[in-house]
Amino acid sequence: MSETAHTPADLGIAGSTVLVTGGVRGVGAGIADVLEGLGATVVVCARRPPDEPVDGRDFHSCDVRDPDAVAAMIEAVVARHGRLDGLVNNAGGSPFALAADASDRFTQKILELNLLAPMIVTRAAQAVMARQEDGGAVVNVSSVSGHRPSPGTSAYGAAKAGLDNLTQSLAVEWAPAVRLNSVVCGPVQTELSHLHYGDDAGIAAVGETIPMGRLASPVDVGRAVAFLLSPLASYITGSTLTVHGGGEKPAFLSASNADNAV
């Protein structure tokens, strides 16, 4: 069934205020669109503003690696909206760089963006959520790169593995007021897919390696995030929800010439 064949469900997040980091492009924009479609008040942040302003969506320019900038942003969000019910740590990523060739500064920046920044933003959000009667929920956007070899993006994979462990640890520390979960994403088709997979033929070829036959869309990720933020997931914390279309077929199956090879 296509993603456009569904009408929005009532997940119980209408009227909530949710901050999405890196929420103006790619996966973050898809998450923001889904949440807004479900009635949430969506606040987005990024270092650069969106190419086209989104009517009715609160935007903050913020370097999420800077604790002072993050604290000021959270304060501004609460001042305007009165509360902060959800946080989606989506900002992240990494260009391709072999570990032996990457500079120490490059590696440091990748680790800061993908691991340290989510911790900075989450701590600032928790200080608000813990004082609210209904608490709050955090979803960290992680990656399959943190759960399998990640050649060419080793620092990114290591950071995402750390992010999933951080999610589990803080879920224990901050329960029951604040729930934390992570969405572990496989390849997602965005406006930057060509940087990782090449032209349309390359993107299609990558999609054919996935059991579901395609890359995820940002909306696929957004729906998983919306569920974890919602009251439907009120007893789910410290968990990882894998959104990867069935994962990657084991390489030996393609190499095998046995009759039962897939």
Image: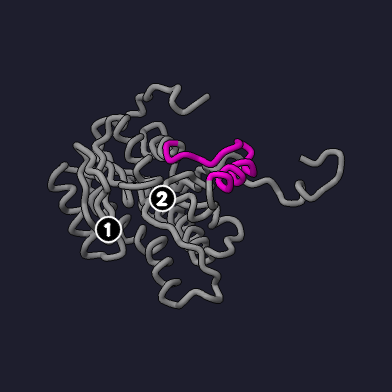
- Residue highlighted by disc 2: 140
Left or right: where does residue 91 sit relative to residue 148?
A: left
Residue plotted at (38% across, 66% down): 112
In the image, 45 versus 41, the foreground residue is 45
Report the quarter where the C terminus lies.
top right
Q: In the rendered view, would you say 166 is above or below 176?
A: below
Count residues near mark 2 (Cα–Cα under 10 Å), then give few for <14, some for 14-19, many for 20+.
many
Q: Is residue 208 within the magenta segment?
A: yes
In the image, 50 versus 70, the foreground residue is 50
> What is the image's colouring?
one colour
Q: In the rendered view, would you say 227 is above or below 47?
A: above
Left or right: where does residue 189 sit relative to residue 48?
A: right
Amino acid type, mark 2: Asn
Secondary structure beneath dot 2 equals strand
Quarter of the image where one finds residue 99:
bottom right
Q: Is residue 131 within the magenta segment?
A: no
- Residue highlighted by disc 1: 47
Residue plotted at (16% across, 42% down): 81
Q: In the rendered view, would you say 133 is above or below 39?
A: below
Q: Where is residue 153 in the image (x, y as percent from the top left)?
A: 52, 63
**Rounded to the nearest whole Å, what is the CA distance between mark 2 and mark 1?**
19 Å
Left or right: where does residue 21 sit relative to residue 181?
A: left
Earlier sequence position, callout 2 versus callout 1: 1
Q: What stretch is highlighted in magenta?
A: 200-219
Q: How many marks?
A: 2
Secondary structure beneath dot 1 equals loop
Amino acid type, mark 1: Arg
Q: Position of residue 55 (x, y in %)?
A: 20, 37
